[in-house]
Image (tube, rainbow, N blue to C red):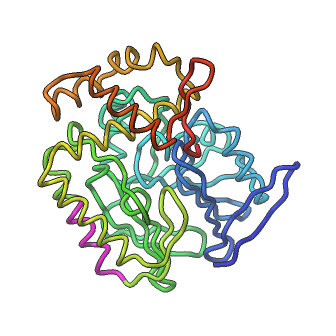
Amino acid sequence: MPERQNLDNGVRVAAIEILDDLFFIERGYLNGNHFVYRSDAPILIDTGYVSDFPETERVISGLGVNLSHVSLIVNTHTHCDHIGGNRIIQERSGCGIALHKIGKHFIDTRDDWSTWWRYYDQEADFFTCTQSLHDGDTVDIGPHQFDVIHTPGHASDGIVLYHRRNKILISSDTLWENGSAVMTLRIEGSAALFQMLKSFEKIESLEVEAVYPGHGRPFGDMGNALAKQKDKMQQYLMDRGLVGGDLIKKIMVYTLLMKGQIREDRFFESLMETHWYPETVKLYFNGGYEAKYQEVMQSLLDRGTVQRKDGFYHTTVKP
């Protein structure tokens, strides 16, 4: 996997060319990773978080791609960190946007609950979905043909993309090398953990040499990553508190990523004003809202994931 450095207007961009003119760009956790097919009619896979769009444009432009010329965006699911640039890019370019048929339904019906945006108080814009993808379809990213595999669990409309000839898997939030994406059973349903395990079975049957995830670095040992994540889902099934605790930690950090920083004396109050926080604490821990907040916040401070500065909390996690 050759690494390539590009320089554009003083902004240094690191990208990996995974197939001819198809590049992987690693971001952080506020923004999903990008895939850019560079041509006269560029194609993008996922577009980051809306408030970070200026940075998204800089890194994509660093590959010599003009967003006004984009012909197609393929989204791996409709969560805010993967669709943030869609509306802006579509307005500039008139491009098509392809989603799994469930995600298309969410966007067509303006369902900001099933996309998680309203539940987690996230910033996102609706757009026009022009193409419906189904399990077993193929999608052309320039000359590169990928199989579409539906992988619900984390997201009911989640897909991964598999390049059979080169044994490449674009795994989105279905599989990371380390850690796992949030499981929101309140929206995805009580069977979501079982669906996630079934999705792992689907991709386990594939011959894969390189995995390019939705967050984090590329990796080669898919079997090891799958074993860890299957074990985690089994632990979740045995102990519901693990699901709730993991969700609270991750969404508190994600909230800090979205906001940049939050006053120490306002963070708990602001969480209580959301849908997700009081509901999650009640569902998994039978209440005790402030005690749970203090417990989780102290663990994040102890690990250095969250830091205090001048009366504000901020996170050290890369956006």
Image coordinates for residue 42, horizontal then vertical, percent: 66, 59
Q: Position of residue 65 (x, y in %)?
A: 74, 56
Range covered by the magenta-colored residues: 196-206
246 vs 103, nearest the viewer: 246
Q: Quadrant of the C terminus?
A: top right
The residue nearer to you, when weighing 249 against 275, is: 249
Number of numbered discs overlaid on the protein picture: 0
Q: Nearer the viewer, residue 234 or 111?
A: 234
Q: Residue at x 30, y 26 (%)?
A: 277
Task: Locate residue 195: give its quadrant.
Answer: bottom left
**Residue drawn at the location 43% of the way across and 38% of the way down:** 300
Q: Quadrant of residue 153?
A: bottom left
Residue 174, percent from left and from top: 36, 60
- Dominant SS of magenta comes to helix
Relative to 252, is 100 above or below?
below
Q: Name the one closer to the observer, 294 or 96.
A: 294
Work out whether 285 lies above or below 46: above
Taking the image as shown, residue 107 lies to the left or right of residue 200, namely: right
